[in-house]
Image: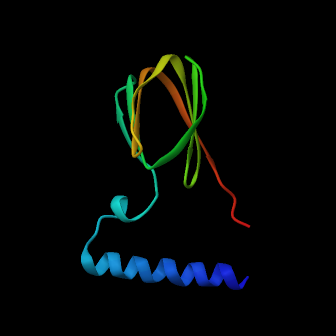
């Protein structure tokens, strides 16, 4: 319990500093950012790793949960340590959030 309260105080402090310095949330946090171009391309920033990869299904782990991308002829067009680009015919995007204890 003490550790959780300490983490909450640190998060509040960091949020205040970021607000004062006007640092965008995308830069200062580990929240994923999605850029979707039609039904054929998606760019995901701030991801951890690729968990599963098939031409019809891609499962990506992020800092706040798991992203499932379903479609046809899916491929990982570009992968860097910061972002990943997926191309193909995208049918659906599902999100499984992590449950905090």
Outermost left residue: 22
Residue 13 locus on image (x, y percent): 44, 83
63 to the left or right of 36: right
Q: Quadrant of the N terminus?
A: bottom right
Residue 10, given in percent of the width and then of the height, sits at: 51, 81
Asked if 71 appears above or below 8 in the picture, the reply is above
Question: Observer-nearest residue: 40 or 17?
Answer: 17
In this view, the residue farthest toward the top is 73
Question: Which residue is found at the position 41% from the left and 77% from the top?
Answer: 15
Where on the picture, by quarter, is residue 37?
top left
Name the spot of residue 58 as percent of width and height, x first: 56, 28
Looking at the image, what colour scheme do you see? rainbow
Left or right of 96 on screen, residue 63: left
Seen in the picture, residue 56 relative to 97 is either above or below; the reply is above
Does 65 sit left or right of 25 as displayed?
Answer: right
Q: Position of residue 36 (x, y in %)?
A: 37, 35
Residue placed most toward the observer, 72 or 1: 1
Q: Quadrant of the C terminus?
A: bottom right
Q: How many numbered discs sit on the rendered protein?
A: 0
In the image, 35 versus 48, the foreground residue is 48
Name the residue rendered at 69%, 59% in the picture: 99
Q: Residue at x 53, y 20 (%)?
A: 71
The structure residue drawn at horizontal position 59% and vertical position 20%, both measured from the top left corner, is: 54
């Amino acid at each position: 319990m003490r550790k959780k309260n300490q983490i909450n105080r640190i998060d509040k402090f960091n949020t205040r500093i970021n607000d004062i310095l006007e640092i965008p949330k995308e830069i200062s946090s580990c929240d994923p950012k999605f850029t979707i171009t039609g039904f054929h391309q998606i760019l995901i920033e701030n991801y951890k790793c690729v968990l599963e990869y098939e031409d019809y299904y891609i499962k990506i782990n992020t800092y706040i949960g798991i992203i499932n991308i379903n479609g046809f002829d899916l491929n990982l067009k570009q992968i860097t340590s910061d972002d990943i680009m997926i191309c193909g015919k995208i049918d659906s995007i599902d999100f499984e959030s992590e449950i905090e204890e």
